[in-house]
Amino acid sequence: MSSKIIPVILSGGAGTRLWPLSRELYPKQFLPLAGSHTMIQETLLRLRGLADLAAPIIICNEDHRFLVAEQMRQIDCRPEAIILEPVGRNTAPAVAVAALHGEKADSIMLVLPADHVIRNHQAFHAAINCGLAAAEAGKLVTFGIVPTAPETGYGYIRSAKASAKAAAKASPQAETLAIEAFVEKPDHKTAEKYVKAGNYYWNSGMFMFKPSALLGELKKHAAKIAPACRKALAEGSSDSDFVRLEKASFAASPSISIDYAVMEKTSLGVMVPLDAGWNDVGSWAALADVNPSDAAGNVIDGDVLTCAVKNSCILASNRLVAAVGIEDHIIVETADAVLVAHKNRVQDVKHIVDQLRAAQRVEAVNHRRVNRPWGTYEAIDIAPRFQVKRITVNPGESLSSQMHYHRAEHWVVVSGTARITTGDKVIILSENQSTYIPLGQTHRLENPGRIPLELIEVQSGSYLGEDDIVRFEDVYNRS
């Protein structure tokens, strides 16, 4: 009898090459970049229809936990576990934690990055079903993408032979091939040779195996990983929503990818060829490739006007964007940043993000509109001694009980109902009513109603940073 398939979704990436849409606290996997659902939602939705599919395990960092939980709720998905990484340690420790979490059942783990596009779901399911028998037999299965071009941005997998149909330049058969070697990213001339040879495949970063098989190979080839992860799980904590790994133990694990730690060394690896419209959306040029274009080859979204523009991608989120006489360019407009880049240089966007981080600029981390577990806030105006925000509190949600050492706050309700606690006093405010929170006053904001609470907050004081918050009680377990 076939084992259950447990999707293990790796959602730890920052997606810096898709800045300014993708940012550290709101990366690309949480954005609807190639459809109506976000990329992490699509990763799970495309699995529906597989037999014996179990609830997923999702690995993400602590800062993204409420984004993951909310996006799963939106697609009516109840994960087996949302495991929180206190620090990033690459994919091998993340997968090891998932394997340790599920080692008693020893069901088949289907390890998938949260930010890939796969257009042909039927072909993807066929490849998964093909690899299932090998995984049940103790093999470590990976999926090799049939290359469509001499791509230099991917690592390659060399198989013992080409897929019969791939050699005939048709869709490959669902078959399991022996792996001869994993190959580093090549130069263009070498990549052309790989594509012509027919037995080289792009390394997709997707895997399927039993927890016992992976843990056995980790013990042979990267012995320090599993003990650190086991201790992090044992000394961590859990509640109804999240599994929190103990930080010091998890940080003690080597930081290494599953490819380097195991797949390049194991004798148990096999590969299933996959030709299913796969794209890892690793750059703006790649995103343009997976979205529909107009007659001039342009991908347009938002309020955009063009004249004599060809083969470009122009996205406008907030304002009118007009472009004249350009070709092969990327233009991305957000509320607080605009990117202009030639398609040939989109891999260098990460250098802009590096500059932003070095300057400690908030544009590397957050959008102007910031998500919180209770709702959102958006900066409207800011100056040295005041800041204006628009705050939205979802029905039934509440901010923490808190106080500020350096700022006072004025709140004006725009719509909905606010319940406000200041010290021992509780008041109810409705539309067009306001209140004042003095500096140093303990306070809490709640939405007891059935519609979103919208209010304008005016902060004034000597320091307006988000770290000027002392929390006394918080339903979301934030420190």
Image (spheres, grey):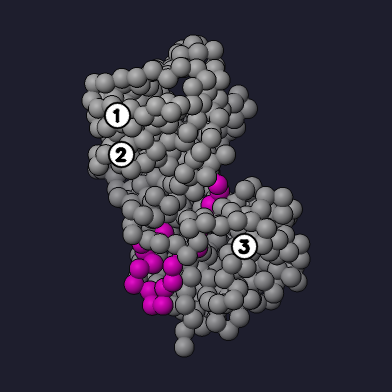
Residue 177 visible somewhere in the drawing:
no
> Label 1: which residue?
428
Three-letter amino acid code at the position of disc 2:
Pro
The answer to which of marks 1 and 2 sits earlier in the sequence is 1
Residue 179 at what x, y percent from top left? 62, 73
Distance from Cα at disc 3 to Cα at disc 1: 46 Å
Dot 3 and dot 1 residues touching (CB under 8 Å) = no
Dot 2 and dot 3 residues touching (CB under 8 Å) = no
Q: Give the quadrant of residue 182.
A: bottom right
> Label 3: which residue?
97
Residue 143 at what x, y percent from top left? 52, 68
Q: Residue at x 31, y 19 (%)?
A: 434
**Residue 119 falls left or right of residue 357:** left
Element marked by disc 1: strand
Three-letter amino acid code at the position of disc 3:
Val
> Label 2: which residue?
448
Three-letter amino acid code at the position of disc 1:
Ile
Dot 1 and dot 2 residues touching (CB under 8 Å) = yes
Q: Residue at x 57, y 39 (%)?
A: 479
Residue range of the region highlighted in magenta in the rendering: 43-62
Query: Compared to 240, does 469 lie above or below?
Result: above
Distance from Cα at disc 2 to Cα at disc 3: 39 Å
